[in-house]
Protein backbone atom coordinates (compact mmCIF):
# COMPACT_ATOMS: atom_id res chain seq x y z
CA UNK A 1 0.00 0.00 0.00
CA UNK A 2 1.44 3.33 -1.09
CA UNK A 3 0.24 6.79 0.03
CA UNK A 4 -0.19 9.25 -2.83
CA UNK A 5 1.49 12.53 -1.85
CA UNK A 6 -0.94 14.62 -3.94
CA UNK A 7 -3.77 14.19 -1.42
CA UNK A 8 -4.34 13.32 2.25
CA UNK A 9 -5.63 9.79 2.89
CA UNK A 10 -5.34 8.46 -0.68
CA UNK A 11 -3.62 5.10 -1.22
CA UNK A 12 -2.89 2.86 -4.20
CA UNK A 13 -1.56 -0.69 -4.44
CA UNK A 14 0.86 -0.05 -7.26
CA UNK A 15 3.58 -1.51 -5.02
CA UNK A 16 1.77 -4.88 -4.86
CA UNK A 17 2.76 -7.12 -7.81
CA UNK A 18 -0.14 -9.49 -7.15
CA UNK A 19 -2.78 -6.75 -7.17
CA UNK A 20 -1.12 -5.30 -10.30
CA UNK A 21 -1.35 -8.69 -12.00
CA UNK A 22 -5.09 -8.90 -11.30
CA UNK A 23 -5.49 -5.33 -12.56
CA UNK A 24 -3.62 -6.22 -15.75
CA UNK A 25 -6.14 -8.97 -16.49
CA UNK A 26 -9.03 -6.57 -15.83
CA UNK A 27 -7.55 -3.97 -18.18
CA UNK A 28 -6.94 -6.47 -20.99
CA UNK A 29 -9.69 -6.13 -23.63
CA UNK A 30 -9.52 -9.89 -24.25
CA UNK A 31 -10.78 -10.63 -20.72
CA UNK A 32 -14.40 -11.76 -20.91
CA UNK A 33 -17.16 -11.23 -18.31
CA UNK A 34 -16.51 -14.43 -16.31
CA UNK A 35 -12.82 -13.68 -15.76
CA UNK A 36 -13.61 -9.98 -15.29
CA UNK A 37 -16.06 -10.69 -12.47
CA UNK A 38 -13.64 -13.19 -10.90
CA UNK A 39 -10.89 -10.56 -11.04
CA UNK A 40 -13.09 -8.05 -9.24
CA UNK A 41 -13.93 -10.60 -6.53
CA UNK A 42 -10.21 -11.36 -6.09
CA UNK A 43 -9.31 -7.69 -5.90
CA UNK A 44 -12.03 -7.09 -3.31
CA UNK A 45 -10.67 -9.89 -1.17
CA UNK A 46 -7.05 -8.72 -1.27
CA UNK A 47 -7.90 -5.07 -0.84
CA UNK A 48 -10.02 -5.89 2.20
CA UNK A 49 -7.10 -7.84 3.63
CA UNK A 50 -4.83 -4.82 3.10
CA UNK A 51 -7.45 -2.56 4.65
CA UNK A 52 -7.48 -4.60 7.86
CA UNK A 53 -3.89 -3.38 8.39
CA UNK A 54 -5.33 0.13 8.90
CA UNK A 55 -7.95 -1.04 11.41
CA UNK A 56 -7.93 -0.81 15.20
CA UNK A 57 -6.97 -4.06 16.88
CA UNK A 58 -7.36 -5.34 20.41
CA UNK A 59 -5.29 -7.85 22.36
CA UNK A 60 -7.48 -10.46 24.02
CA UNK A 61 -6.73 -13.21 26.54
CA UNK A 62 -7.42 -16.71 25.20
CA UNK A 63 -6.81 -20.27 26.35
CA UNK A 64 -5.31 -22.84 24.02
CA UNK A 65 -5.86 -26.48 25.06
CA UNK A 66 -2.46 -26.14 26.79
CA UNK A 67 -2.23 -22.69 28.40
CA UNK A 68 -3.37 -19.09 28.54
CA UNK A 69 -1.97 -16.68 25.98
CA UNK A 70 -2.82 -13.47 24.18
CA UNK A 71 -4.72 -13.25 20.91
CA UNK A 72 -5.59 -10.51 18.41
CA UNK A 73 -8.99 -9.22 17.48
CA UNK A 74 -9.55 -6.67 14.73
CA UNK A 75 -12.14 -4.54 16.53
CA UNK A 76 -13.09 -2.46 13.49
CA UNK A 77 -13.76 -5.55 11.38
CA UNK A 78 -16.84 -6.16 13.53
CA UNK A 79 -18.25 -2.72 12.71
CA UNK A 80 -18.21 -2.41 8.95
CA UNK A 81 -20.91 -1.32 6.55
CA UNK A 82 -20.20 -1.98 2.86
CA UNK A 83 -22.13 0.28 0.50
CA UNK A 84 -22.42 -1.42 -2.89
CA UNK A 85 -22.85 1.00 -5.78
CA UNK A 86 -24.77 -0.75 -8.57
CA UNK A 87 -23.87 -2.26 -10.92
CA UNK A 88 -20.14 -2.73 -11.11
CA UNK A 89 -19.48 -2.97 -7.37
CA UNK A 90 -21.40 -6.24 -6.95
CA UNK A 91 -18.39 -8.56 -7.57
CA UNK A 92 -16.06 -6.20 -5.66
CA UNK A 93 -18.39 -6.36 -2.64
CA UNK A 94 -18.48 -10.15 -2.90
CA UNK A 95 -14.69 -10.16 -2.47
CA UNK A 96 -14.63 -7.55 0.30
CA UNK A 97 -17.19 -9.43 2.38
CA UNK A 98 -15.12 -12.63 2.27
CA UNK A 99 -12.61 -10.90 4.56
CA UNK A 100 -14.99 -8.43 6.22
CA UNK A 101 -17.51 -11.15 6.93
CA UNK A 102 -19.30 -9.38 9.78
CA UNK A 103 -20.30 -6.51 7.50
CA UNK A 104 -23.75 -5.07 7.17
CA UNK A 105 -24.47 -4.12 3.57
CA UNK A 106 -26.14 -1.13 1.97
CA UNK A 107 -27.11 -1.07 -1.70
CA UNK A 108 -27.47 2.08 -3.76
CA UNK A 109 -28.09 2.50 -7.45
CA UNK A 110 -26.22 5.19 -9.35
CA UNK A 111 -26.25 5.71 -13.04
CA UNK A 112 -24.11 8.34 -14.69
CA UNK A 113 -25.61 10.33 -17.56
CA UNK A 114 -23.76 11.42 -20.69
CA UNK A 115 -21.05 14.11 -21.02
CA UNK A 116 -20.71 16.98 -20.39
CA UNK A 117 -23.15 17.05 -17.44
CA UNK A 118 -22.67 13.50 -16.12
CA UNK A 119 -25.83 13.79 -14.05
CA UNK A 120 -26.23 11.02 -11.50
CA UNK A 121 -29.53 9.26 -11.18
CA UNK A 122 -30.02 7.55 -7.83
CA UNK A 123 -33.29 5.69 -7.58
CA UNK A 124 -32.66 2.94 -5.07
CA UNK A 125 -31.13 3.55 -1.64
CA UNK A 126 -31.15 0.91 1.13
CA UNK A 127 -28.64 1.77 3.84
CA UNK A 128 -28.52 0.47 7.43
CA UNK A 129 -28.23 2.75 10.48
CA UNK A 130 -24.66 4.10 10.69
CA UNK A 131 -23.19 4.08 14.22
CA UNK A 132 -20.20 6.04 15.65
CA UNK A 133 -17.96 2.92 15.73
CA UNK A 134 -18.67 2.02 12.10
CA UNK A 135 -16.25 2.00 9.20
CA UNK A 136 -18.34 2.72 6.14
CA UNK A 137 -16.73 1.25 3.03
CA UNK A 138 -18.12 2.50 -0.25
CA UNK A 139 -17.33 -0.02 -2.98
CA UNK A 140 -17.25 1.27 -6.54
CA UNK A 141 -14.62 0.06 -9.01
CA UNK A 142 -14.34 3.29 -11.02
CA UNK A 143 -13.74 6.86 -9.79
CA UNK A 144 -13.91 8.92 -12.97
CA UNK A 145 -15.38 12.44 -12.56
CA UNK A 146 -16.13 11.57 -8.92
CA UNK A 147 -19.76 12.72 -9.30
CA UNK A 148 -21.22 9.31 -8.40
CA UNK A 149 -19.27 8.97 -5.17
CA UNK A 150 -19.85 12.59 -4.11
CA UNK A 151 -23.57 11.93 -4.37
CA UNK A 152 -23.37 8.51 -2.68
CA UNK A 153 -21.40 10.00 0.24
CA UNK A 154 -23.93 12.86 0.63
CA UNK A 155 -26.71 10.29 0.80
CA UNK A 156 -24.95 7.83 3.12
CA UNK A 157 -23.99 10.59 5.58
CA UNK A 158 -27.71 11.12 6.23
CA UNK A 159 -27.82 7.70 7.94
CA UNK A 160 -25.54 8.64 10.89
CA UNK A 161 -21.93 9.63 11.62
CA UNK A 162 -19.29 6.94 11.10
CA UNK A 163 -15.80 6.54 12.53
CA UNK A 164 -14.36 6.31 9.01
CA UNK A 165 -15.60 6.69 5.44
CA UNK A 166 -13.48 4.64 3.06
CA UNK A 167 -13.82 4.32 -0.70
CA UNK A 168 -12.50 1.07 -2.17
CA UNK A 169 -12.13 1.06 -5.92
CA UNK A 170 -10.08 -0.33 -8.76
CA UNK A 171 -9.10 2.73 -10.81
CA UNK A 172 -9.32 6.46 -10.24
CA UNK A 173 -8.65 9.53 -12.34
CA UNK A 174 -6.81 12.36 -10.55
CA UNK A 175 -9.64 14.85 -11.24
CA UNK A 176 -12.20 12.52 -9.64
CA UNK A 177 -10.10 12.12 -6.51
CA UNK A 178 -9.60 15.90 -6.24
CA UNK A 179 -13.34 16.56 -6.57
CA UNK A 180 -14.24 13.95 -3.94
CA UNK A 181 -11.59 15.22 -1.49
CA UNK A 182 -12.85 18.78 -1.96
CA UNK A 183 -16.47 17.81 -1.27
CA UNK A 184 -15.69 15.23 1.46
CA UNK A 185 -12.21 15.89 2.96
CA UNK A 186 -12.81 13.24 5.65
CA UNK A 187 -13.03 10.36 3.16
CA UNK A 188 -10.12 7.94 2.66
CA UNK A 189 -9.59 6.43 -0.79
CA UNK A 190 -7.99 3.05 -1.54
CA UNK A 191 -7.63 2.09 -5.22
CA UNK A 192 -5.53 -0.47 -7.05
CA UNK A 193 -4.09 2.30 -9.25
CA UNK A 194 -4.47 5.96 -10.12
CA UNK A 195 -4.57 6.44 -13.89
CA UNK A 196 -3.57 9.35 -16.10
CA UNK A 197 -6.72 11.25 -17.06
CA UNK A 198 -10.30 11.21 -18.36
CA UNK A 199 -11.27 11.33 -22.02
CA UNK A 200 -14.01 13.67 -23.33
CA UNK A 201 -16.66 11.01 -22.58
CA UNK A 202 -15.55 10.75 -18.95
CA UNK A 203 -13.75 7.40 -19.31
CA UNK A 204 -10.55 6.75 -17.39
CA UNK A 205 -7.36 6.44 -19.49
CA UNK A 206 -5.77 3.97 -19.91
CA UNK A 207 -8.53 2.48 -17.72
CA UNK A 208 -10.40 -0.75 -18.34
CA UNK A 209 -13.45 0.48 -20.21
CA UNK A 210 -16.98 0.39 -18.79
CA UNK A 211 -16.72 -1.75 -15.67
CA UNK A 212 -20.47 -2.47 -15.49
CA UNK A 213 -20.66 -3.53 -19.13
CA UNK A 214 -17.52 -5.65 -18.93
CA UNK A 215 -18.81 -7.47 -15.86
CA UNK A 216 -22.43 -7.92 -16.91
CA UNK A 217 -22.72 -7.10 -20.62
CA UNK A 218 -24.00 -3.90 -22.21
CA UNK A 219 -27.66 -3.11 -21.46
CA UNK A 220 -30.00 -2.02 -24.23
CA UNK A 221 -32.53 0.78 -24.04
CA UNK A 222 -36.11 -0.14 -25.04
O1 LIG B 1 -16.91 9.03 -11.17
P1 LIG B 1 -18.05 9.07 -12.14
O2 LIG B 1 -17.78 9.96 -13.30
O3 LIG B 1 -19.34 9.40 -11.47
O4 LIG B 1 -18.18 7.64 -12.79
C1 LIG B 1 -18.02 6.46 -12.09
C2 LIG B 1 -19.26 5.62 -12.13
O5 LIG B 1 -19.48 5.15 -13.46
C3 LIG B 1 -19.72 3.75 -13.41
O6 LIG B 1 -21.06 3.47 -13.20
P2 LIG B 1 -22.16 3.63 -14.36
O7 LIG B 1 -22.90 4.92 -14.20
O8 LIG B 1 -21.54 3.34 -15.68
O9 LIG B 1 -23.19 2.49 -13.95
P3 LIG B 1 -23.04 0.92 -14.12
O10 LIG B 1 -22.14 0.42 -13.00
O11 LIG B 1 -24.43 0.43 -13.96
O12 LIG B 1 -22.47 0.65 -15.48
C4 LIG B 1 -18.86 3.30 -12.24
O13 LIG B 1 -19.24 2.03 -11.74
C5 LIG B 1 -19.06 4.41 -11.25
O14 LIG B 1 -20.18 4.22 -10.41
O1 LIG C 1 -13.68 4.59 -17.27
C1 LIG C 1 -14.80 4.51 -16.71
C2 LIG C 1 -15.46 5.64 -16.22
C3 LIG C 1 -16.68 5.48 -15.62
N1 LIG C 1 -17.21 4.25 -15.51
C4 LIG C 1 -16.58 3.16 -15.99
O2 LIG C 1 -17.11 2.04 -15.88
N2 LIG C 1 -15.39 3.31 -16.60
MG1 LIG D 1 -21.33 1.74 -16.68
Image: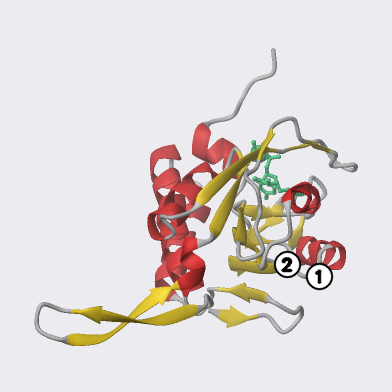
Ligand 1 shown in quarter = top right
**133 left or right, relative to 50:** right
The quarter of the picture where the C terminus appears is top right
**43 left or right, relative to 157:** left
Q: Is residue 28 visible?
A: no
Between residue 142 and residue 159, name the one nearer to us: 159
Q: Quadrant of residue 184?
A: bottom right
Residue highlighted by disc 1: 185
Question: How is the rendered protein coloured?
Answer: secondary structure
**180 left or right, relative to 14:** right
| Residue at horizontal 74 percent and vertical 30 percent from the top | 123
Q: Quadrant of residue 210?
A: top right
| Residue at horizontal 80 percent and vertical 36 percent from the top | 113
Disc 2, disc 1: CB below 8 Å? yes
Between residue 128 and residue 20, name the one nearer to us: 128
Task: Identify the element where label 2 is drawn.
Answer: loop
Q: Would you place residue 7 above or below residue 97 in this image? A: below
The location of residue 163, given as percent across then percent down, is 66, 68
| Residue at horizontal 42 percent and vertical 65 percent from the top | 46
Total residue callouts: 2
Q: Is residue 86 visible?
A: yes
The location of residue 219, given as percent across then percent down, is 61, 25
Check the image and name the residue furthest to the right.
117
Mark 2 surroundings within 10 Å by alpha-carbon count, few (fewer than 14), some (14 through 19), many (20 or more) = many
What is the C-alpha distance between the residues marked 2 and 1? Answer: 6 Å
The location of residue 207, given as percent across then percent down, is 62, 56
Residue highlighted by disc 2: 187
**6 left or right, relative to 140:** right
Between residue 30 and residue 53, name the one nearer to us: 53
Amino acid sequence: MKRDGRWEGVYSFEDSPFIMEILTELRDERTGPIAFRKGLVKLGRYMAYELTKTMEIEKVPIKTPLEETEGTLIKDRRNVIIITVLRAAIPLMEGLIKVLDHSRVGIVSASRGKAPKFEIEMKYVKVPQVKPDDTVIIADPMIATGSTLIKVLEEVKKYGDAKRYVIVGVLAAPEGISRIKEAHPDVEIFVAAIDRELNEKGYILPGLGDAGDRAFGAPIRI
